[in-house]
Amino acid sequence: MMTALRLANVRNVNVLVDGKFLEQSLEMVTGNEFKNHKTYSLTPVYETGVFHPKIMLLTGPTQGLLVIGSGNLTSSGLSTNDEIWAAFHLNSLDCNNAPVFAAAWQYLQGYFPQVKGFNQQKLDWITQYSPWVRELALIAPGKTFIPLDDELEVKFVANTASVSIYQQLIESLPKSKVKKLSIVSPYFDEKGTILEQLTADFEIEEIACLTDQQFGILPTKLNEILYNQVAFYDWKDCLKDFDTRYNRLHAKLFHFEYTDGWEYLLIGSPNATIQALGSVADFAVNGEAGLLLKRKNKNGYIRELGINTKNGPTLNVKAAAKGKTHRGDSTPSINYENKILYAERNGSRLTVHLKKTSKAVYEIQVLNSSNEEVEIHSLPAVSEEAVIILQQPDKAFRLFLVSDGVRVSNYSLIHNISYLVKSTPDPSHDKLTQIIEGFLADPENGIYSDLLKYIDYSVDEEEFGLPAQPLRGASGLSVSTNTTIDHIGLTEEELYKLRSAQARDLLLLNTSNVQIADILNIISKGMVVQSSEVQENAEQALSQDDIEFQMGSEQEVDQSVIKRARGEAEQRAIFKHLDKIDKFFSNQHKKFFETRMLQDVPKRPITLKELSNVSVMTDLLYMFYGKSYNVSTIEVGLYSTNKTKPIIQELEKEFGMVKTSKINRDNFSIVYFEMFPEYYLEFKKRVAASGANLLVNQEEFSPITRSYPYFFQEDLKSILIETFGCFLLCANSKAGFHQYTNESQNEKVIFYRDSIFRKCTFLILNIRWREDELVYRDILLLDLLQLVCPDKLSTKYTKELKLAIEDLYKSNQLKSEHFSDNLKYYFSSLIPTVQSWQRIFETDSSSLSTNRSSLGSGTIIYHRELGFATLKQSGNNFITLVKPCLPWDDYKGENTMKIVYPLTNIILFKN
């Protein structure tokens, strides 16, 4: 059966591979083998013999492709070797091929219990994104042949714990006389055991065996009876187009031609060995799979495949030398004290799955891709699942166990979960992935407006399986990073569900929000070189823009027009993102602003997705504040009279013309307008069609170029006070940030908090604040230190923070003259005060509690549900506070609100 395959966009690649073969392969890796295949997952499978089936199953939303044959997933197995394959396509569960898919899927599921770690999630993706696979369970393939058409029937066969392929042959083949048995196999039993078995169980008139004298393993100890009964041929003599430079026999087939005209063809992975096929009495030791085809004999499969033994000389197998470079059905395995079944890295957390528990004291030695030791960790009283924290996780490539300085296990490749999650077959990720790859490959032409389209702003009601606790600010409240889960008392099914839930949680690290936040963070740090000029294809630029900008001819669209279109589109996209963030966090405070009661302050912790959106906002502000785009226009003159004024007014609206203050001293009836050059040709047509003598003739148009900043200083102030202030109120120390059961997610939360803290602090310090605005500057800085900063304000950290903020200043496009004074105030005055206050707050917060009636207006206070604020007024059962994000009071000219507060005391920060 021949078919042409074109495999494109294969995302979720799960490879079940023979464990012993993988062990041998990893003994000799150079480190380059997996550089281009980081999203592939390898699951070693251990059989009594070898795991040998060759099955490729490709699944899509509604269709599937199943390929079963003899070839390995190697360049030779898929190209130069002589292999045999059968391919089946499925586009409906009602199609004839569906039972074949059902049988193959049922067989593969038998190996799924050996799958470890995140690979379980990758297998779940198959049924999640190809739901028809789940329904295959409703199709019972049974033990009978499956009719594919009027002539051909097929049966899936495989070695299992209950039946061997040979036993299925006995059950499936007729007991009548076999006219001829043709066997194609590169490997045989040394004594020809399978041949003895076949001649004993079937009445066969003629047997022909085709094998590979140069590379195969031949039955050199065949008994005399079989030697005289069976004809052996060298494969190169039986194939017309055989080329010794490329061809090598690796196909396996058994062709039974019956005297009544029926033929049966077994193809797949099993060689002509007892290990591969088993016997009537014994199960096979190898994992093997294949297909048994049945049809009425026409030309015969052997002849259709181009195999001809008539002109080829027979082969003396007893005199042939045994091939030394290939082991056939046996893969030697080193007798290790213990085996590493699978290893994966989740951030710095390394999980190692072992074959057995041990009381021995092992060490795990971690190597990089150059086979150099990176680090070593002690593992006393090893269980079947060991967890360690890596010090240099990015260098970890493979590992092994050591006891008393001697290696006592196989090498194991370390899978990186951060790469595996990126292989999700979710189609919505494809376009975003292309955009992100475009930023990395050509950052100068990265289109931010395209990137921001993929951000999700919905409320993140995540299901975590276990109660989640808020992750407190490191500035004074406890941070728990303990992700240990008590498995005692859980059933096997509950434990599996728990691990599956943990695996699904890891997908949060691959959401569009997180991917966008990560790429912007990289760009903002200058790790991807940017250009101040924006360039792109003109057609692409106009296709991105609004329809009213698409009126000029292609010849009239020059670089200035493109840059203007891009600049305006980027600005709109950025402000749209800021508006979404503002609405999201403002809605969290809606009830509190209405009731003015502290019990209605948001209590829900901020999730990773929400934090990633704030990180995106922060990076956009950092990168685009101080950056401008150019707008080029041309000037046109029109004769304005009482008769032409209505026409000119219509043209103004239609072409977005802007009247200038320019005056023609020689003719006061001429009025000048600015317009975009790409509109000019269409504008001239409209003027001509009006029939009025409007346009002042001019031979040349000198472009007028103006620079427009993405953000004015007042824009940035407003965003920090209103939008970022709303985020800080949600991040108050009582609600905090969500603590995940997965350590990588917690690490990502810490990463975003640190990035937001540093960049927002820099932005605040890089602005000129008026005297009446200093209260907002200080409250923002205090809330950042208390609520967002992920570290303690130690002397060492403070020094490092100062250097980091100074580096941000050096790299930023806008360098305010007020930065130096703000920086000095921040580190010389504000931070020392905060350090002193935090020490008291942590040890004896009650000593900071002060009768509020004694506090004057302008006192900075702290409340666990509000963060920092300035006290404006104190009454019998209320307090009036000034704080960023509180409603704006037009009469008072400040962000202020009266809050119900019946308590007498409040925590004081400073007067």
Image (cartoon, rainbow, N blue to C red):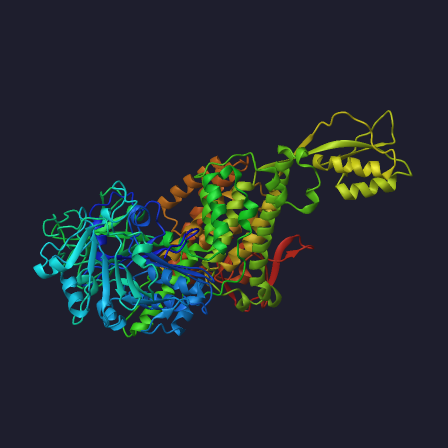
Question: Viewed as shown, does residue 11 lie left or right of 33?
Answer: right
The residue drawn where x is 25% and y is 73% is 171
Q: Quadrant of residue 277?
A: bottom left
Judge whether residue 586 can be spotted in this image.
yes
Residue nearest the viewer, comparing 179 with 401: 179
Judge whether residue 112 can be spotted in this image.
no
Extreme-right residue of the structure: 642
Question: Viewed as shown, does residue 280 lie left or right of 674?
Answer: left
The picture places residue 104, in percent across and down from the top left corner, at 34, 65
The residue drawn where x is 33% and y is 45% is 35
Question: Viewed as shown, does residue 509 lie left or right of 201?
Answer: right
The picture places residue 898, in percent across and down from the top left corner, at 61, 62
Residue nearest the viewer, comparing 668 with 92: 92
Q: Quadrant of residue 707?
A: top right
Numbered-mark total: 0
The residue drawn where x is 9% and y is 49% is 319
Residue nearest the viewer, comparing 300 with 200: 300
The picture places residue 784, in percent across and down from the top left corner, at 48, 51
The residue drawn where x is 58% and y is 38% is 537
**Quick one: quadrant of the N terminus?**
bottom left
Residue nearest the viewer, comparing 674 with 692: 692
The picture places residue 309, in percent across and down from the top left corner, at 24, 52
Above or below residue 782? Residue 502 is: below
Q: Quadrant of residue 47?
A: bottom left
